[in-house]
Image (spheres, grey):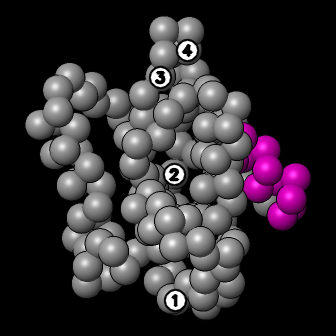
Amino acid sequence: MGRALLQSERNATLFIDVLRSYVALRKFVVHDFVVMPDHVHLLVTVDGDIAIEKAVQFIKGGFSYRLKKEFGYLGDVWQRGFSEVRVNDRPSFLQHRAYIARNPVKRGLVDSPEKFPYCFSCLAKQKAAGAEAQVVPPVFGTTEVVP
């Protein structure tokens, strides 16, 4: 993404919903993610039936399609390509998870990773607590309720 298209809660939430839909379809497994105002970080596992390029195509295409259809967005959504890093062992996996968690803090959006609402760990905590809705702090802009 070249610009801050994910800076609104609406768009960040839509992106997360797209991720959830592909996980439900068993296209890939998401281990971690963070939705930043102008990019995303994903830690995913694909099985032998799908290449990482195809998984990224699902995500980018699904988000673009829904953004245009549901909200009437007319511009380009994504930059071409993506960066890929292979994770081959547990230490590398844990290092990447820590990097993903620290990204909002590094950018000055929050002072601790657990305060950032658009990440895997935050949503997992909500689910574990049985939260049906949460008031999201104004990380990107306006405050709104997110399911």
Q: Which mark lies nearer to you, 1 or 2?
A: 1
Secondary structure category for the residue under label 1: loop
- Per the model, the C-alpha gap separating discs 1 and 2 is 21 Å
Q: Are marks 4 and 3 in contact (CB under 8 Å)?
A: yes
Of the image marks 1 and 3, the number of the one nearer the N terminus: 3
- Per the model, the C-alpha gap separating discs 3 and 2 is 22 Å
Circle 4: residue type: Ile
Secondary structure category for the residue under label 3: loop
- Per the model, the C-alpha gap separating discs 4 and 2 is 23 Å
Residue 66 painted magenta: yes
Q: Which mark lies nearer to you, 3 or 2?
A: 3
Circle 1: residue type: Pro
| Relative vertical location of residue 108 with respect to residue 33 in this rendering, above or below | below
Q: Position of residue 66 (x, y in %)?
A: 79, 50
- Residue 51 shown left or right of residue 76 in the figure: left
Q: Residue at x 39, y 48 (%)?
A: 32
Q: Are marks 1 and 2 in contact (CB under 8 Å)?
A: no
Stretch in magenta? 62-72
Dominant secondary structure of the residues highlighted in magenta in the image:
helix
Residue underneath mark 1: 138
Residue 46: image tag: 3
Mark 4, other Cα within 10 Å: few <14 / some 14–19 / many ≥20: few
Q: Residue at x 54, y 29 (%)?
A: 28
Q: Residue at x 60, y 88 (%)?
A: 135
Residue underneath mark 2: 1
Residue 92 painted magenta: no
Circle 2: residue type: Met
Circle 3: residue type: Val
Of the image marks 4 and 2, the number of the one nearer the N terminus: 2
Of the image marks 3 and 2, the number of the one nearer the N terminus: 2
